[in-house]
Image (tube, helix red, strand yellow):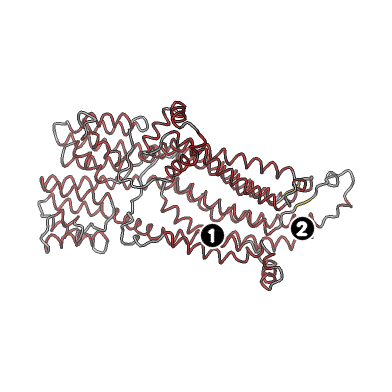
């Protein structure tokens, strides 16, 4: 099935990369048609299916050329880093140790190969992600279908309703299904639903069973039997989603332990051993530590985390906040970025002066920085600058989105309770204006109470119909409510009242129970993952920076002890005296900078991991969490580093 993104008006970064690569590299290919045919024969059917499913508008040969371009860019970056490192050795291989040369070669080969693999496999990765992400939409989308069928037993109308009122990935697939029916790709909606269920059944057996049960429910003779079958179909979808997430929560513990050990405990513990390895003849340089800790290890952790998160079954997706929302439409991301970079650059000035003292060799500023460095490592200013830039941008850009989203979630919690009140009044035969007025009094002081009060006012004072009172773009009570659930249920109420007050009221009461069930499943899933994600966040913001700071203090202690050792007093048969390359030339300030960068990367990776487990792929929550966590992590790292260095330095003989 072609996964069509409706309203797509601009290319993604991947499509831009493919088109750009084709323009640049086609001359090197030679015969374009021959290369295109050769590529189409070489790629697998899975690859072609992935391109169709994701809706990425590129040809296979363009993806191959993009992978070549990605490898070239990664190679150029690697070469730039190699040249920068080489320059510190005065461009003399004789002054470089073998380990640094090996690491530089490994980086120069590993980065291009990794880029080549990632770009060439991106359509498959994206397809897998979208399939999993779409499965998380199943309970919500099926609930729209079920709610509609309880009022109007028409399967085609139910599918159209779900397609129109859901902005999720599966909702877009439903819109594609409706389009296929209209252009006669299928003979009937029944054939389309069957094909759709069988297609998605390859990834979700419970979705397939639920859809087939819905099809059979529509044919039921009595209303009671139909409603029982519809409720059973929704229960299957709920139970399947909850079961998948529980299985994932049980499987995630071992990968998390591996992440703690490989990503946090072992690397940070090894920091303290760096000076000691020089005793056995190894030359440890800051560039070796930089390549290992700030390039290779983060890339390995990123790959590992991505693999774990791709196996996470999607659950309920967060509300979508459109850019047209009054509270976010004036957010200027570029301006926020420039302000964040300016603030970070100003904070980083002392650290930059320390790293490049030749620019201020004889000035008073250089003396001031030197005196500051005697108390606080000057490179900490660079870390504070980086953390400030990240935090300022994330909070200024994404805090308003998060505030709106929290308001929407709170409204949805209130809505399920108030909906029961409205449903009961409508079922008793009361007019909608009285039902909304009664609900506003019941929910007095809440956001939903204000919305229902405005709805009642529109009906009684402005003499509008129910649809206009709710959805009119100028005065409708829901014009600034960006919750798909609330708007969808209100659409159902409008349609149901036209048919029968009694049936609409009974259906609305049942819908209120469905919404409660949805919320209970959501809360249950969050609780099952809460302990795990809270420990990951604590590790990122507290324990990892603290361990890194303490270990840096131990590192300085060992460096001082080794530096004060009288090597001539060591017996000749001792292995230490036989080491001809005894040196540890990593300055404490540079060591703090390199490990501090690794701590920043750990915060980015671990918060992404916790967010991916807890929220799925919620960019707003992730960026906001980064903005809140980054200053805390760097503050703890800085305080612990300074205190531990002062403490352990005082203990040195």
Viewer-side label of 2, 1: 1
Q: Is residue 307 visible?
A: no
Q: Is residue 290 visible?
A: yes
Q: Is residue 543 above or below residue 127?
A: below
Identify residue for label 2.
560
Residue 351 located left or right of residue 4:
right
Q: Are marks 2 and 1 in contact (CB under 8 Å)?
A: no
How far, Cα to Cα, is label 2 from label 1? 30 Å
Residue 291 located left or right of residue 342:
right
Q: Is residue 379 above or below residue 538?
A: below
**Which mark is first along the chain, 1 or 2?**
1
Mark 1 surroundings: few (<14), some (14-19) or many (≥20) residues within 10 A: many
Q: Position of residue 255 (x, y in %)?
A: 53, 40
In which quadrant is the N terminus drawn?
top left
Write the residue at 21% across / 39% down. Answer: 158
SS at badge 2: helix
Residue 487 located left or right of residue 311:
left
In which quadrant is the C terminus drawn?
bottom right
Q: Quadrant of residue 550?
A: bottom right
Q: Position of residue 431 (x, y in %)?
A: 10, 55
The disc placed on residue 100 is none
Mark 2 surroundings: few (<14), some (14-19) or many (≥20) residues within 10 A: some
SS at badge 1: helix
In terms of depth relative to the viewer, which is nearer, 378 or 17? 17
Residue sticking out furthest to the top = 41
Identify residue for label 1.
387
In terms of depth relative to the viewer, which is nearer, 36 or 511? 36
In terms of depth relative to the viewer, which is nearer, 65 or 482? 65
């Amino acid at each position: 099935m072609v996964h069509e993104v409706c309203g797509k008006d601009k290319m993604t970064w991947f499509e831009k990369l493919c088109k750009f690569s084709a323009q640049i590299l086609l001359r090197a290919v030679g015969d374009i048609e021959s290369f295109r045919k050769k590529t189409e024969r070489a790629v697998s059917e899975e690859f072609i299916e992935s391109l169709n499913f994701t809706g990425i508008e590129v040809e296979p040969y363009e993806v191959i050329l993009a992978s070549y371009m990605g490898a070239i860019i990664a190679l150029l970056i690697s070469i730039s880093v190699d040249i920068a490192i080489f320059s510190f050795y005065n461009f003399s291989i004789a002054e470089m140790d073998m380990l640094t040369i090996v690491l530089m070669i490994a980086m120069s080969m590993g980065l291009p190969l990794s880029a080549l693999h990632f770009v060439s496999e991106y359509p498959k990765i994206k397809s897998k992600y979208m399939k999993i992400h779409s499965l998380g939409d199943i309970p919500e989308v099926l609930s729209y279908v079920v709610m509609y069928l309880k009022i109007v037993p028409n399967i085609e109308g139910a599918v159209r309703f779900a397609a129109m009122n859901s902005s999720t990935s599966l909702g877009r697939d439903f819109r594609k299904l409706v389009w296929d029916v209209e252009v006669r790709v299928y003979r009937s909606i029944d054939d389309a639903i069957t094909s759709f269920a069988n297609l998605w059944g390859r990834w979700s057996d419970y979705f397939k069973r639920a859809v087939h049960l819905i099809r059979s429910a529509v044919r039921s003779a009595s209303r009671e039997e139909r409603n029982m079958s519809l409720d059973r179909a929704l229960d299957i979808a709920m139970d399947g989603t909850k079961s998948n997430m529980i299985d994932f929560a049980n499987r995630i513990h071992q990968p998390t332990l591996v992440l703690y050990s490989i990503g946090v405990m072992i690397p940070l513990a090894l920091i303290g051993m760096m000076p000691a390895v020089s005793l056995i003849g190894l030359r440890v340089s800051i560039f070796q530590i930089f390549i290992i800790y700030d390039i290779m290890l983060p890339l390995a952790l990123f790959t590992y985390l991505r693999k774990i998160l791709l196996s996470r079954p999607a659950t309920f997706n967060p509300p979508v906040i459109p850019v047209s929302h009054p509270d976010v439409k004036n957010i200027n991301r570029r301006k926020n970025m420039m302000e964040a970079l300016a603030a970070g650059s100003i904070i980083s000035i002392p650290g930059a002066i320390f790293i490049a003292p030749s620019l201020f060799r004889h000035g008073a500023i250089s003396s001031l920085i030197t005196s500051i460095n005697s108390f606080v490592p000057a490179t900490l200013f660079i870390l504070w600058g980086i953390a400030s830039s990240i935090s300022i941008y994330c909070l200024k850009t994404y805090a308003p989105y998060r505030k709106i989203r929290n308001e929407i979630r709170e409204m949805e919690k209130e809505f399920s309770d108030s909906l029961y009140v409205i449903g009961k009044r409508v079922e008793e035969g009361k007019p909608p204006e009285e039902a909304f007025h009664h609900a506003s009094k019941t929910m007095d002081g809440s956001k939903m109470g204000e919305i229902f009060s405005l709805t009642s006012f529109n009906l009684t004072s402005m003499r509008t119909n129910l649809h206009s009172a709710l959805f009119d773009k100028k005065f409708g009570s829901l014009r600034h409510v960006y919750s798909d659930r609330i708007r969808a249920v209100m659409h159902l109420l409008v349609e149901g009242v036209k048919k029968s007050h009694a049936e609409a009221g009974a259906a609305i009461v049942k819908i209120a129970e469905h919404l409660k069930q949805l919320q209970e499943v959501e809360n249950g899933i969050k609780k099952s993952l809460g302990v795990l994600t809270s420990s990951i966040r604590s590790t990122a913001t507290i324990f990892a920076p603290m361990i890194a700071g303490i270990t840096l203090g131990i590192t300085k202690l060992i460096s001082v002890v080794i530096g004060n050792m009288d090597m001539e007093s060591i017996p000749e048969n001792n292995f230490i005296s036989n080491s001809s390359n005894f040196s540890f030339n990593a300055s404490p300030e540079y060591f703090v900078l390199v490990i501090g960068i690794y701590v920043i990367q750990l915060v980015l990776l671990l918060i992404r991991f916790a967010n991916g487990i807890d929220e799925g792929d919620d960019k707003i929550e992730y960026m906001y969490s980064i903005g809140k966590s980054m200053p805390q992590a760097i503050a703890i790292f800085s305080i612990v580093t300074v205190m531990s260095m002062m403490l352990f330095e005082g203990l040195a003989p």
